[in-house]
Amino acid sequence: MSEAKKYVMTYEGVKKLEKELEYLKTVKRKEITEKIKVALGYGDLSENSEYDEAKNEQAFVEGKISQLENTLRNASVIDESEISLDIVSVGCSVKVYDYDFEEEVTYSIVGSTEADPMNFKISNESPVGSALIGHKVEDEVIAMVPNGTSKFKILEIGRE
């Protein structure tokens, strides 16, 4: 049997997933159970779209619960107090100069389950994140991105 994938996560990311899991198990499950009860009251299940919709939602939620439990079970939590500020690693923030856009940008390097590029949280598995990992302040880094390459200079490394 193959080894389960380890998910590198920050403490904040684990707490967020635990909160979502708790919501799905307590609130969402009850809501769906009520929808199914109401739909059963409509009679004939063969033509009952409300019942079908509720069962589909139930299957989706149960799948999401299973996915979250698996992620949390295989989470490797980064101890933010042990993060070295000498090199870029998961759990740190990194200020870079982006040569393509001629601007400074600060990224938080997070595990793949926490990535949120719109809020500058990039995964350690993303092209830019993986290129930055292991480099120091003043290093120039080239990342292979979908439309070619991007060049960055690391200006500062900090904690989130």
Image: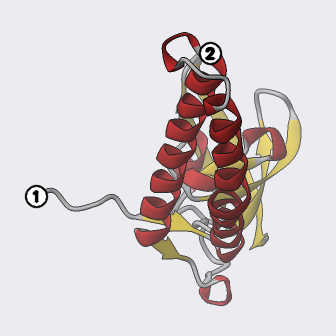
Relative to 57, does residue 93 appear above or below in the rendering?
below
Report x, y in % for residue 111.
56, 58
Report x, y in % for residue 79.
60, 85
What residue do we see at 48% from left, 63% from top? 69
Residue 81 visible, this angle: yes
Q: Nearer the viewer, residue 124 or 100?
A: 124
In the image, what residue type sits under mark 2? Ser
Q: Gap between marks 2 and 1, in whole Å?
A: 40 Å
Left or right: 98 in relation to 141: right
Q: How many numbered marks, from 0 up?
A: 2
Task: Tell which residue pokes out farthest to the left in this image.
Answer: 1
Q: SS of the residue at dot 2?
A: helix
Which residue carries the number 1 mark? 1
Image quadrant occupied by the N terminus: bottom left
Q: Residues within 10 Å of mark 1 (few under 14, many from 20)?
A: few
Relative to 46, does residue 104 appear above or below in the rendering?
below
Disc nearer the start of the sequence (2/1): 1
Which residue carries the number 2 mark? 49
Report x, y in % for residue 30.
69, 54
- The image quarter containing residue 10 is bottom right
Q: Nearer the viewer, residue 74 or 134?
A: 74
Left or right: 103 in relation to 152: right
Image quadrant occupied by the C terminus: bottom right
In the image, what residue type sits under mark 1? Met
Report x, y in % for residue 12.
72, 72
Comparing marks 2 and 1, which lies closer to the viewer? 2
Task: Tell which residue pokes out farthest to the bottom in this image.
Answer: 81
What residue do we see at 60% from left, 22% from top? 43
Task: Tell which residue pokes out farthest to the top in this image.
Answer: 47
Q: Residues within 10 Å of mark 2 (few under 14, many from 20)?
A: few
- The image quarter containing residue 37 is top right
What residue do we see at 83% from left, 46% from top? 119
